[in-house]
Amino acid sequence: MKRQLISLIFVGLVSFANAQWIQTSFPAVDYITCFAFSGNNIYAGTGGYGLFLSTNNGNSWVMMHNGLSINTDASALAINDTSIFAATDNGIFFSSNKGASWKALDSSTVGITALAINDTSIFAGTTVGVYYTSNNGASWAAIDTGLPSHSWINDLVLN
């Protein structure tokens, strides 16, 4: 029984070790900072090249910069139904049409490293703590009670 279990584990590990990555045709950029998924759409934020969309599993990509500077650093993306929120070096932007156009929500909220959405609540992890809005970014409140001062938040997960 022990020998069969060890054999099964070994076969499983060998199968996992032989998995291969396939390169897609992502445009030449310095680095990708974040991804978000909605249905068949893959959204990618980049450092210095803005936002991109793929509707075919990464086989091709389209730059989405209508309302954004082309050389935007995008640090975080979050999707709620058809609404997409993008944290950039120029503030937070919002799209209600799958990224075809973008509207600035708050240009004073910079240093955002993570976004998460739960219904109508948006949470932003920043270089100085966590912030929250329930009015689509019109105003933000710090919700970092209990965190060390000036906590750098890299990721947020809502349950």
Image: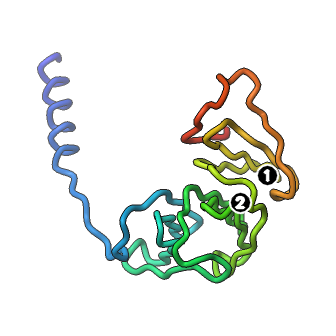
Q: CA distance from mark 1 to mark 2?
A: 7 Å
Quadrant of image for the C terminus: top right
Residue at 79% x, 37% y is 142
Q: Position of residue 49 (x, y in %)?
A: 47, 72
Disc number placed over residue 5 in the picture, else none: none
Q: Position of residue 34 (x, y in %)?
A: 50, 57
Q: Amino acid at mark 2?
A: Asn
Q: Position of residue 3 (x, y in %)?
A: 11, 20
- Identify the residue under disc 2: 80
Q: Nearer the viewer, residue 8 or 154?
A: 154
Disc number placed over residue 119 in the picture, else none: 1
- Characterize the local packing of mark 1: few (<14), some (14-19) or many (20 or more) Cα atoms within 10 angstroms: few
Left or right of 3? Residue 135 is right
Mark 1 vs 2: CB contact within 8 A? yes
Left or right of 152? Residue 80 is right
Q: Is residue 46 above or below residue 66?
A: above
Q: Amino acid at mark 1?
A: Asp
Q: Nearer the viewer, residue 45 or 61?
A: 45
Q: Secondary structure at mark 2?
A: strand
Residue at 61% x, 61% y is 88
Left or right of 59? Residue 108 is right
Residue at 75% x, 74% y is 103
Residue that protrudes farthest toward the top in the picture: 2
Quadrant of image for the N terminus: top left
- Characterize the local packing of mark 2: few (<14), some (14-19) or many (20 or more) Cα atoms within 10 angstroms: some
Q: Secondary structure at mark 1?
A: loop
Q: Nearer the viewer, residue 6 or 76?
A: 76
Left or right of 89? Residue 142 is right
Residue at 65% x, 37% y is 128
